[in-house]
Amino acid sequence: MVQAWYMDESADDPRLPHRPEPGRAVGLEQLRGLGVLYWKLDADKYENDPELEKIRRERNYSWMDIITICKDKLPNYEEKLWNQCANICKTAGPGLSTAGESAVLGHWAFPPMSMEIKVFYQEHLHLDEEIRYILEGSGYFDVRDREDQWIRISMEKGDMITLPAGIYHRFTLDEKNYVKAMRLFVGEPVWTAYNRPADHFPAREQYVRFLAQTA
């Protein structure tokens, strides 16, 4: 089962857990109250998993691919990662639409390395849901709560998460420096990230209304 907690305020390496002692754990009910959805699946059978297919049908996740963030794909990885960049080798899911190879950071959808590198560990939002299913490795999603505090969600093999449109969040690898994940999307993917402040977007306004209605 997924673990989540309120982060400390340390400026140490973002890949560390940042779990204070004593800690403040966050349960699934609190995450659902923020619009964050979670499933635990069997990642070893992702290619032919009826439960995954059921979720995709019910939520209209028609597009998917698989990406890998791995240390040996980028020279001078340590320096570049904490300058907020990373490289991706991306492969398409069997029998499903693809978008070609790309470099991916932060929210895992960035242009090739020959183009401008975008920010990795930068707080941002999207105008659509962000769906990630961890097939191998691990990492952290951080999301803001109602009081604007950071909640860290530890993502490991078999964890699938949906972040609602309009939520401020960010992603980082952990100290293992490796993750392989499935990305899903409703229709053709739109990967644009809007760094905070981005409160003027309708998706953000709708999300704020959702928080008020579910408080």
Image (spheres, rainbow, N blue to C red):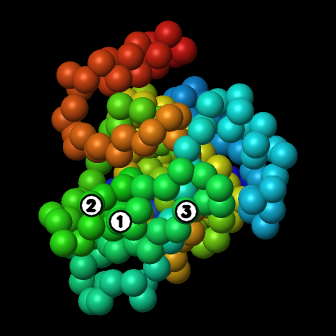
Residue at image x 19%, y 35%? 197
Asked whether disc 2 touches disc 1, contact meaning CB atoms under 8 Å apart, the reply is yes
Task: Label 3: state its secondary structure.
Answer: loop
Residue 31 visible to an observer of this rendering:
no
Q: Position of residue 49 (x, y in %)?
A: 81, 52
Q: How far apart in space, not on screen, are marks 1 and 3 (Cα)?
A: 11 Å
Q: Amino acid at mark 2?
A: Pro
Q: Which residue is mark 2?
A: 111
Q: Nearer the viewer, residue 148 or 158?
A: 158
Asked whether disc 1 touches disc 3, contact meaning CB atoms under 8 Å apart, the reply is no
The numbered disc on residue 102 is 1
Q: Position of residue 157 (x, y in %)?
A: 68, 65
Q: Is residue 92 above or below residue 35?
A: below
Q: Earlier in the sequence, mark 2 or mark 1?
A: 1
Q: Position of residue 3 (x, y in %)?
A: 64, 54
Residue 54 visible to an observer of this rendering:
yes
Q: Position of residue 192 (x, y in %)?
A: 29, 43
Q: Is residue 104 above or below residue 166?
A: below
Q: Nearer the viewer, residue 10 or 119?
A: 119
Q: How far apart in space, not on screen, are marks 2 and 1 (Cα)?
A: 6 Å
Q: Which residue is mark 3?
A: 92
Q: Quadrant of residue 46?
A: bottom right
Residue at image x 47%, y 68%? 90
Q: Earlier in the sequence, mark 1 or mark 3?
A: 3
Q: Amino acid at mark 1?
A: Ser
Pointer 2 local density, CA inside 10 Å: few below 14, some 14–19, many at least 20: some
Name the residue furthest left. Answer: 116
Question: Does residue 133 appear left or right of residue 101 in this picture?
Answer: right
Task: Label 2: state its secondary structure.
Answer: loop
Q: Earlier in the sequence, mark 3 or mark 2?
A: 3
